[in-house]
């Protein structure tokens, strides 16, 4: 296993072939996932995944400890929650993340970054796998997918993996990936109760490129995103998205400001503050989410759940779309996916959409999706010029479940 997190990975023989290629989504349903290939994805670990994480570690405890991950020996449910929170704090700060390695739609291990630099810098990867999927080459394939994400998507120049010195299986993984030995830190960790050496292996962008790195196909959306369909993704914003998001607001400022007062005076600094203070904070604190709408690889709008009340579990959905992306049904598809994420994954009991009574286009969306008009809140919203009335459309969990069942879709 990797010295910092772990992992065993070796090629399988033909007799052990796992069967036909996976035909579904490599990530579990409703996941903010970074897709690596047709079978593999990384699911960003959210707070509600802590219980599942603990159950998987508990089931693999002896296996992980034997593989030099001594932290697993006494891990408690509270420890698992802290692990999840720590990973989300990394993501919020922009210096790393912790994710579930998923194969054919189920979580089968863990892959995370101990740190993450900006363009020109480095990262260090750690991982572990469940015993029932060892020997399928999953870590090797995952890392090959991540190399494009790191070197092309993020502009890094170096990726490192640390392993316990003498761990033949982990050292075989880094050799297959073309990593080169860089350093050995003596007595840098414990192997059981004894001190062990930590060996570091690294790969430079130039070495990766010289060995045929990259690909002819477009790089998949280089972020954790909820997949809606082949052309539409709902991606988590990061600090580096401020310029692109602000340019989109600037281009449609006058049109947006008619219904969204903040757009009239939004500055680049204000956009950065929104990403750092709301979008990243929300996903880290399980306070709803604010995510970008990417259509055919291009950022074209925003959608999210805000005004969250945990007792009872309710929230409001907001959205906006660039003018040149209208007329394709994008926001209807996006909000349908947000409803599924909210009810099936996050456990909301009620979600609503509130729109200015005069905003016919915005009001048409909840009506298309079957939300019930619950009434009009008079003088409920100040749009910068006047107090406006808001139409409130609501949907309850049982209503959403019934509508999904009627369409013949699966609830997961």
Image: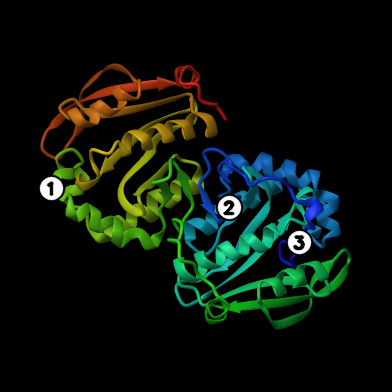
State the CA–CA distance, disc 2 to disc 3: 21 Å
Secondary structure beneath dot 1 equals helix
Between residue 146 and residue 98, name the one nearer to us. 146
Locate the C terminus and report the quarter of the image it occupies: top right
Task: Report the residue marked by disc 1.
Answer: 254
Name the spot of residue 37 as percent of width and height, x first.
Answer: 56, 55
In the displayed structure, does residue 312 sit left or right of residue 17? left
Give the residue at x 64% y 77%: 202
Q: Is residue 43 above or below residue 198?
A: above
Per the model, the C-alpha gap separating discs 3 and 1 is: 57 Å
Of 153 and 83, which appears nearest the observer?
153
Of labels 2 and 3, earlier in sequence is: 3
Quadrant location of residue 388? top left
Q: Secondary structure at mark 2?
A: strand
Residue for badge 3: 11
Q: Please give the residue where the numbered disc 2 appears in the rendered image.
A: 42
Q: Position of residue 330 (x, y in %)?
A: 32, 39
């Amino acid at each position: 296993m990797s010295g910092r997190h772990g992992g065993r990975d070796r090629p399988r023989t033909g007799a052990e072939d796992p069967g036909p290629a996976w035909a579904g989504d490599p990530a579990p349903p409703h996941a903010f996932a970074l897709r690596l290939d047709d079978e593999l994805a990384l699911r960003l670990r959210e707070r509600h995944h802590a219980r599942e994480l603990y159950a998987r570690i508990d089931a693999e405890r002896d296996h992980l400890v034997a593989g030099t991950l001594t932290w697993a020996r006494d891990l408690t449910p509270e420890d698992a929650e802290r692990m999840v929170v720590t990973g989300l704090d990394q993501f919020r700060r922009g210096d790393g993340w912790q994710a579930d390695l998923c194969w054919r739609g189920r979580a089968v291990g863990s892959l995370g970054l101990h740190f993450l630099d900006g363009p020109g810098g480095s990262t260090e990867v750690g991982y572990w796998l469940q015993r029932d999927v060892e020997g399928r080459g999953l870590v090797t394939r995952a890392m090959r997918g991540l190399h494009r994400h790191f070197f092309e998507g993020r502009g890094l120049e170096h990726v490192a993996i640390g392993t316990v010195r003498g761990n033949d299986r982990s050292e075989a993984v880094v050799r297959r990936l073309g990593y080169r030995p860089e350093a050995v830190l003596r007595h840098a960790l414990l192997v059981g109760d004894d001190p062990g050496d930590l060996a570091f292996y690294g790969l430079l962008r130039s070495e990766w490129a010289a060995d045929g790195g990259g690909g002819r196909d477009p790089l998949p959306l280089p972020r954790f995103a909820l997949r809606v369909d082949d052309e539409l993704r709902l991606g988590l914003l990061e600090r580096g998205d401020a310029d692109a998001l602000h340019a989109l607001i600037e281009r449609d400022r006058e049109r947006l400001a008619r219904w969204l007062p903040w757009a009239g005076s939004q500055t680049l600094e204000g956009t950065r503050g929104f990403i750092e203070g709301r979008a990243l904070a929300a996903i880290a604190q399980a306070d709803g989410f604010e995510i970008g709408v990417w259509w055919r690889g291009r950022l074209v709008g925003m959608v999210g759940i805000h005004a969250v009340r945990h007792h009872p579990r309710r929230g409001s959905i907001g959205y906006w779309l660039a003018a040149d992306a209208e007329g394709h049904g994008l926001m209807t598809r996006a909000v349908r996916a947000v409803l599924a994420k909210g009810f099936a994954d996050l456990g909301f009991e009620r979600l609503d959409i509130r729109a200015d009574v005069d905003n016919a286009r915005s009001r048409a969306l909840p009506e298309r999706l079957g939300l019930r008009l619950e009434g009009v809140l008079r003088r409920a919203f100040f749009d910068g010029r006047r107090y406006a009335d808001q139409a409130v459309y609501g949907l309850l969990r049982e209503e959403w479940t019934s509508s999904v069942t009627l369409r013949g879709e699966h609830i997961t």
